[in-house]
Amino acid sequence: MIEIKNITKTYSTGPVPFQALKGVSFKVDDGEFVAIMGPSGSGKSTLMHIIGALDTPTTGKYILDGKDVSTQSDDELADVRKDKIGFVFQAFNLLPRTTVLRNTMLPLMYKGIAKENREPLARKALLSAGLGEDRWQNKSNELSGGQIQRVAIARALVNNPALILADEPTGNLDTKTGEIVLATFQRLNKDEGRTIILITHEHEVAEYAERIIFIRDGLIVSDSKNHKRRIANHHDDN
Amino acid sequence: MTTTDILEETYVALSANKARSILTMLGIIIGIASVIAMISIGQGAQQSISANIASIGSNLVMIMPGAARSFGGPSAGRGSAQTLTVEDGEAIQNGVANIAAIAFDVSARAQATAKGTNTNTSIIGTTPSYTTVRNVEIDDGSFFADAQVQSAAKVAVVGPTVQTDLFGDGGTALGQTIRIKGIEFKIIGVTKTKGGSGFSNTDDTIYIPYTSAQRYLTGNKYLTEIDISGIDSNSSSLVQSDVTDLLLTRHHISDPASADFNLLNQADIVATASSVTNTFTILLSSVAAISLVVGGIGIMNMMLTTVTERTREIGLRKAIGAKAHDINMQFLAEAVALTFIGGLIGVAIGWLIAFGVTYFGILQTKVSLSSILLAFGVSAGIGIIFGYYPARRAAKMNPIEALRFE
């Protein structure tokens, strides 16, 4: 379970301190599929960084899986990311010229999983992400955008995290491929009970989630169940 | 992250940019190869000089007339001073302990002529013990005996160069007659070749009894040198101080600084020559070491480029749980791998150069284990020193900014 309690974030690097988050609070239960939506400059990226344990809030509390991560050191945050969070980025961020399997196994290396146990876990994650076995030995630059994003999803799944955090996962994909990726998220949420937080600025994308938090100027504008939820067509197997 | 993981990541990263990795390594390869080659050539030179010095005699102490001067200093010409006498030599022979053999020398340069040929060569008038003191071996015939010294016999022993110069290639000197300053000498022996390097060419020498030299060549009763062979390696300094005391007393000199003779100890020559070659080796190695530093800077340059190029990768690694320490280790391992492999190749090439120098007969070189270990230590050290800053820069990256890096 995720609990955000009255979080603020002030950047004081510039000449004038800038408050990106001005007191944000919400909870996400296990197994929820939440979209955080907002235009650029709304503070959603800052919020994503805090939820992803890439950054800490200036004030307020962030409790992830019963653990307060709002005041932790860099190394402790790295442990939180390693154990609890799976990232999916807009820019995919796969290692170039590296095979699909190796890319998927990367987090396991930092987790300290024994070498012989890594490949079975990576295979399982790739199957969950819906990438066919015939692609696993391909290098990342030999794949299509949709396939690349599935490798990224598999990499996010491989540690069995409490939370999958997807930052504009369809931003670099065409509509059809984007829908396939969103279908994958919906399936992971429905079939495997994964908790997913999707950060996006697109309404159409947010509508695949079951709950939408709308944020603007560092404050939550609305937080409600998505009544017009889109269900992606189940053509996510390739 | 285990050691195997780090090695694997390093391999993947370095082989992804093979040309760049090899070019970067080249700096270290050249540096290490030249250090290895220079040290081995330096040590070879040192050994060769030591061997040359050893060949002039064993535990040798040389006494020469004239004011004391340091080895290597300017000389007015040996033999120009007339202060050493046969009586001095006999007093030393009878009064100084630890002497294995002693030879009295009267040396001069003179023209020696045979039938239609002539050569300007070094004439050494001496005693039979010279063969022991100065490691002279006889190839043909024999050296003259004490009786011939007593009678100032006109006999000569010639070196192989003199034999060739006067009697042609393959000619035999033994039994022939040569003229030195118009006096006929009968050749009774030829010495073995000893090699012409070092301080003087012992092959281009004619040996005659010192009494004959005094009578026919110099025309006086003085000696130009007394050579003493100590009984063992520790004795030469004892002999040196005993002889100094004895001669100072005999010559009625109270201040050792104004002595009218000087002593040269073989051990001192060896030490001086070693220090010269050592300095030379250090000089050459320092030049080689500079190229190592330049190579190290090349490594740093490449690592900084790599870190910048891979900023997003670093961001990703951090996002999926890599700690600063993991990133630091990964990039440090890359730098050390470059220098270590470079060091390995450098040692091989340096060894080949040393081998080539030996093979083509330029100098007998020796690649010592210590220089190899030193090269490895230095190359790994350079990796750590010059890889430290880029690795730290990578490790300290903020994951958010790194992920956003374009």
Image (spheres, coloured by chain):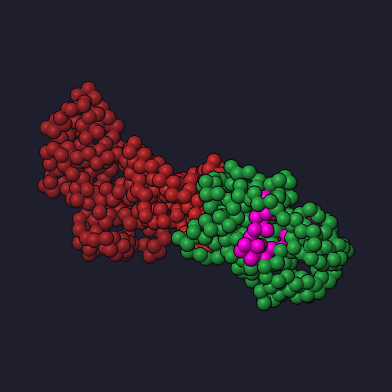
Chain colours: A green, B red
- Quarter that holds the N terminus of chain A: bottom right
- Position above or below: A17 against B345: below
Whether residue B18 appears in magenta in the rendering, the answer is no
Asked if residue A215 lies left or right of residue B12, the reply is right
**Foreground of the two, B77 or A6:** A6
Query: Residue at left 38%, top 65%?
Result: B254
Magenta residues (range): A180-201
Query: Residue at left 33%, top 38%?
Result: B359
Residue B91 coordinates in the image, percent (x, y): 23, 60
Residue A205 appears in view: yes
Asked if residue B359 lies left or right of residue A5, the reply is left
**Foreground of the two, B219 or A10:** A10
Residue B336 appears in view: no
Q: Could you say which quadrant of the image residue B117 lies in?
A: top left
Q: Give the number of marks.
A: 0
**Foreground of the two, B36 or B173:** B36
Query: Residue at left 20%, top 37%?
Result: B158
